[in-house]
Amino acid sequence: MASKCDRCSEPPIHFLRYSGQHLCSDHFLDLVGRRVKKEMRAQHTIEKGRRIGIAVSGGKDSLVVLRMVNEIVRPFRDVDIVALTIDEGIAGYRPSSLDITGGITKELGVEWHLSDYRNLFGKDLDDMVKESDMGPCSICGILRRNALNRAAKEADCGVLVTGHNLDDMAQTVLMNVMQADVQRLARLGPHMDPIPGLIPRSMPLRTTPETETYLCALLLGIPIHGEECPYAETAKRGHYRDLLLKAEEETPGTRHSLLKFRDHISPLIPRGRSHVSSCTRCGEAVVEKGEKPICRGCLLLDELGIGKEE
Ligand SMILES: [Zn+2]
Ligand SMILES: [Zn+2]
């Protein structure tokens, strides 16, 4: 590590291997703040009077993005933000992150909306998992999407900000490439070309590596909720995370290259959606065609035996 920050005479706290920079804490936070601002501007324009929804799980990335976006929009009186949290119903995991989120939104004076699987879908995730052969992450992925979109619509948000960092993005791109899943790659946010009925996703931390969001959380005094989701080990993501860590170690900048690859190729992929309608049960957008359109969330609830009869 160099003895001085590249921009001032303070001691550096972080070396950014992929760009060769040594930065002190102030200049490091300044750099991440600028990236967040730049990504927000490039990804979306918020219509006047509509709010920015921030998906806050209580994990470090979501709290860092909440803090940073709040800081950016505070000088503008006509921009409002709202924190949206989904309680999946995971005993021993979710409750402590809810306490942290409640505390931080209160401290920042940000409105907080909390919705839960039990009220939305009739059951906690824990019960759905017990009674089904489906993997918890498959169930949760579909339902969270549905729940967050509904919450963002109810709170009148023009955009839904998520805390996805560079590692998350690069893992997803690599996974889609290795599984030849072109349509999924095309659907990956940020959504510059929104689908009616779906609140577009914005990912202002997408160019910031996970080690750096962790460092931001430490420097900003954000409490790090140590518990891991008890279902996390069933995710196949771990395999791609290990591959990428190795690739990044050998060739710094690999994660950024994967993200650039996505940005170049995404606009060239035909979306393959001819018709967007509303789910006849819950009103969420459905991209598939059909006589009676039903969304993936409602189809899943049918499979779990808790779908609502029409
Ligand atoms: Zn400095
Ligand atoms: Zn539905």
Image (spheres, rainbow, N blue to C red):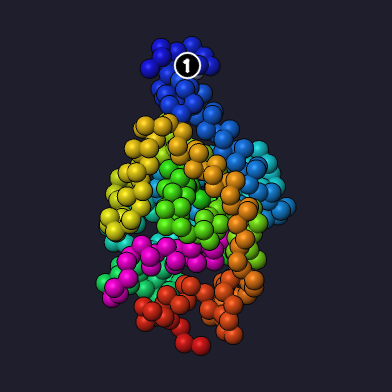
Residue with the mark numbered 1: 5
Image position, residue 300 (x, y; %): 42, 75
CB of mark 1 near ligand 1 (< 8 Å): yes
* Disc 1: CA contacts within 10 A as few (<14), some (14-19) or many (>=20): many
Q: Tell me which residue sits at (47%, 76%) in the image.
A: 298
Image position, residue 222 (x, y; %): 41, 39
Q: Tell me which residue sits at (39%, 54%) in the image.
A: 98
Residue 141's place in the image compared with 73, above or below, is below
The main secondary structure of the magenta stretch is: helix
> Quarter of the image holding residue 41?
top right
Q: Residue furthest bottom?
A: 310
Residue 86's place in the image compared with 305, above or below, is above
Residue 112 visible in the current orientation = no
Image position, residue 131 (x, y; %): 28, 76
In the foreground, 80 or 296: 296
Residue 77 visible in the current orientation = yes
Magenta extent: 131-153
> Which secondary structure lies at badge 1?
loop
In the figure, is residue 286 to the left or right of 119?
right
Image position, residue 238 (x, y; %): 32, 50
> Quarter of the image holding residue 142?
bottom left
Asked whether 111 falls inside the magenta stretch, the response is no
Asked whether 141 falls inside the magenta stretch, the response is yes
Q: Residue furthest right?
A: 48
In the foreground, 270 or 278: 270
Identify the amino acid type marked 1: Cys
In the figure, is residue 116 to the left or right of 133?
right
Q: Tell me which residue sits at (42%, 77%) in the image.
A: 301
